Image (cartoon, rainbow, N blue to C red):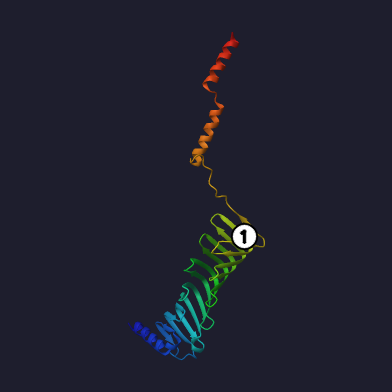
């Protein structure tokens, strides 16, 4: 009950003082001075912060800089861009409220819900203004039938383009494309490869049907026709028998 009361008090203090900044905080515990934007304020236990465009939950939050410009978060981080519906989870976060750039580190899972794009990497730097994400180390991005991997990638949300490099590879079902640099247009599914291009494409064409028959049935019919052509007709067999009798006489 005491934690709940403290939590509510912190929300009221920050929201009333910082109403003009449109930023709200809450937590189970706080160190620092509420409303003094020139000091570092730490929130711990179910820490939460909401700005005009960003919502962040974590085990702990640290607010610093003029008007709490800088936000750092640690432990079980969940975040969401309220404008573009981009969501993410990670181990560590550093966010600049002025530049609107978020640096996500450690087991980052980043999703563009609107375009059904999901990316995983060890580091993702997300620029809210430009709506792009730079991904580094063990990049794995999925979209429709595409599974894209590499060491480095840039995802452009507005243009729906992906640039991939460093052991770059894209799998589309059974097809595989590899190159030093790969560009994927996520709208048209067009792939551009550059440098050390390799790939394998499976032949997915179905077996030809005959007169509407299934492939196996058509094959059986073709075989039976060949056997029938090789087999002599009854008249030919009778003529052969008469010929043999005449030869015997």
Identity of the residue furthest to the right in this view: 195
Q: Which residue is mark 1?
A: 178
Compared across the picture, whether 41 is left or right of 244 comes to left
For the N terminus, the quadrant is bottom left
Compared to 240, does 153 lie above or below?
below
State the residue at coordinates (55%, 31%): 226
For the C terminus, the quadrant is top right
Compared to 70, does 218 lie above or below?
above
Q: Position of residue 19 (x, y in %)?
A: 42, 87
Compared to 133, does 182 lie above or below?
above
State the residue at coordinates (56%, 59%): 171
State the residue at coordinates (53%, 32%): 225
Compared across the picture, whether 49 is left or right of 141 comes to left
State the residue at coordinates (48%, 78%): 74
Q: Position of residue 102 (x, y in %)?
A: 52, 77
Could you say which quadrant of the image residue 154 lies in? bottom right
Q: Position of residue 135 (x, y in %)?
A: 56, 71
**Front in this rendered view, residue 64 or 189:** 189
Q: Position of residue 18 (x, y in %)?
A: 43, 88
């Amino acid at each position: 009950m005491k934690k709940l009361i403290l939590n509510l008090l912190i929300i009221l203090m920050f929201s009333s003082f910082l109403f003009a900044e449109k930023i709200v905080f809450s937590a189970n515990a706080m160190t620092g001075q509420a409303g003094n934007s020139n000091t570092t304020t730490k929130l711990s236990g179910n820490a939460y912060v909401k700005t005009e465009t960003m919502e962040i939950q974590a085990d702990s939050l640290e607010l610093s800089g003029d008007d709490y410009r800088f936000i750092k978060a640690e432990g079980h981080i969940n975040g969401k861009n309220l404008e573009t519906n981009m969501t993410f989870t990670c181990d560590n976060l550093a966010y600049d409220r002025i530049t609107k750039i978020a640096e996500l580190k450690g087991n980052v899972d980043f999703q563009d819900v609107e375009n059904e794009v999901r990316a995983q990497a060890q580091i993702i730097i997300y620029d809210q203004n430009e709506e792009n994400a730079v991904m580094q180390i063990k990049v794995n991005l999925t979209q429709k039938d595409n599974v894209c991997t590499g060491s480095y990638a840039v995802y452009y949300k507005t243009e729906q383009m992906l640039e991939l490099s460093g052991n770059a590879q894209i799998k589309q079902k059974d097809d595989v494309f590899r190159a030093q640099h790969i560009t994927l247009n996520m709208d048209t599914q067009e792939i551009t490869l550059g440098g050390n291009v390799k790939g394998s494409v499976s032949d997915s064409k179905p077996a030809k049907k005959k007169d509407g028959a299934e492939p196996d049935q058509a094959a059986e019919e073709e075989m039976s026709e060949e056997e029938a052509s090789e087999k002599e007709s009854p008249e030919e067999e009778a003529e052969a028998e008469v010929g043999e009798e005449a030869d015997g006489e």
